[in-house]
Image (tube, rainbow, N blue to C red):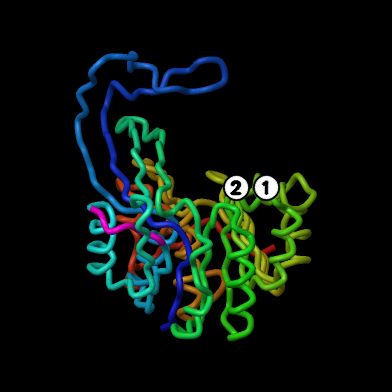
Amino acid sequence: MARIVSLGSALQDIYLIDHDDLAPTQIGGDAIFGEILVGSKVDIDKLSYEVGGGGVNSAITFSRHGHEAVLISNIAKDSAGNAITKVLDRENVDTSYLNFISTKATGTSIILLDSVHGERTILTYRGASEKFNNFSEDDLDLIQPDWLYVTTLRGDMDTLLRFFEKAKELGVKIMFNPGGKELENTKKLIGLLSDVDVLLVNKSEAAKIVPGVVLTELLYHLNNYVETVIITDGAMGGIASNGKESYRFGIYEDTKVKDATGAGDAFGSGFLAHFAAGRSFKNSLIFASANSTAVVSKIGANRGALTNAEQLHMMPIQKI
């Protein structure tokens, strides 16, 4: 197994779950939670305290797969931070490199979840996970990881560059799943891609980086920057290439979505968890899809994350 560092946010997720008052209502082309009146009191069916954030979600998947998972993130010494560290300790994630921020509280999301339709609205206080410029790339000298898995750092391109350059200096491989803030700075993002070994984006994100409309076009153009590229397309599955093999794939199972929070993190970390364990490119894509399906079938951004003992069945996947 490998030693994998997850770089990203750590949040406490507080779910407010209800079957009727949070039912979505259509207004024009948008869906809103239309059953709640301003000034009213609403009874909620269930309250659930979970943990999330891209760094936490990926680290849990890596650890459950049997890897040595290390998390670099920011929290505060408060109740939410304690809840996060308690879960990470239980999941055998190395928390030695967590940074404790004294000026802000631990990041927290309030997630309004309609238990009937699986729709949600997320209210997020970023707090300690708002900025990442305090991260030290020298931690990689001490950790000596095999892989660096990076989710969004909210557009902090300087910190990303520092970590990418250090990783390449040490011979550490990088998997990158950029977020909206990184995609706002396309020029700098493309400059980072030369250091990336595996890039994960969805279709709309890919179209913000390179020209193209259909998946094959987007994949072709992104492969000019990164050897291994995975582009997801929601219920349509996605497309992937490692320079030697290319695949179109569908979804693992047509299952009821209870909570879509963490689906992208589950796919990306699921792929790397399997791939870093020496599994084939094709089988790693299957595990990624299975892990994402398992996560969205439960409430919480990582509660359903699979272990390496999971017996997988085949899914629609075709070599192209």
Marker disc for residue 11 = none
Between 134 and 58, the residue placed more toward the observer is 134
Give the residue drawn at x 57%, y 20%.
29
Q: Is 138 left or right of 76, judged from the image as shown?
A: right
209 in relation to 260, above or below: below
- Magenta stretch, residue numbers: 74-78
Give the residue drawn at x 46%, y 64%.
269
Mark 1 element type:
loop
Per the picture, the main secondary structure of the magenta-coloured stretch is loop
Marker disc for residue 180 = 2
Question: Residue 255's x, y, as percent?
Answer: 39, 45
Q: Which residue is mark 1?
A: 184
76 in relation to 279, above or below: above
- How many numbered marks have been drawn onto this rendered protein structure? 2
Quadrant where the N terminus lies?
A: bottom left
Check contact, mark 1 vs mark 2: CB within 8 A.
yes
Amino acid on which disc 2 is placed: Gly
The residues bearing labels 1 and 2 have C-alpha atoms spaced at a distance of 6 Å
Between 293 and 10, the residue placed more toward the observer is 10
Amino acid on which disc 1 is placed: Glu
Question: Residue 191's x, y, as percent?
Answer: 74, 64
Q: Is residue 77 magenta?
A: yes
180 in relation to 320, above or below: above
Question: Residue 164's x, y, as percent?
Answer: 61, 72
* Crowding near the residue tagged with mark 2, few <14, some 14–19, many ≥20 C-alpha atoms within 10 Å: few
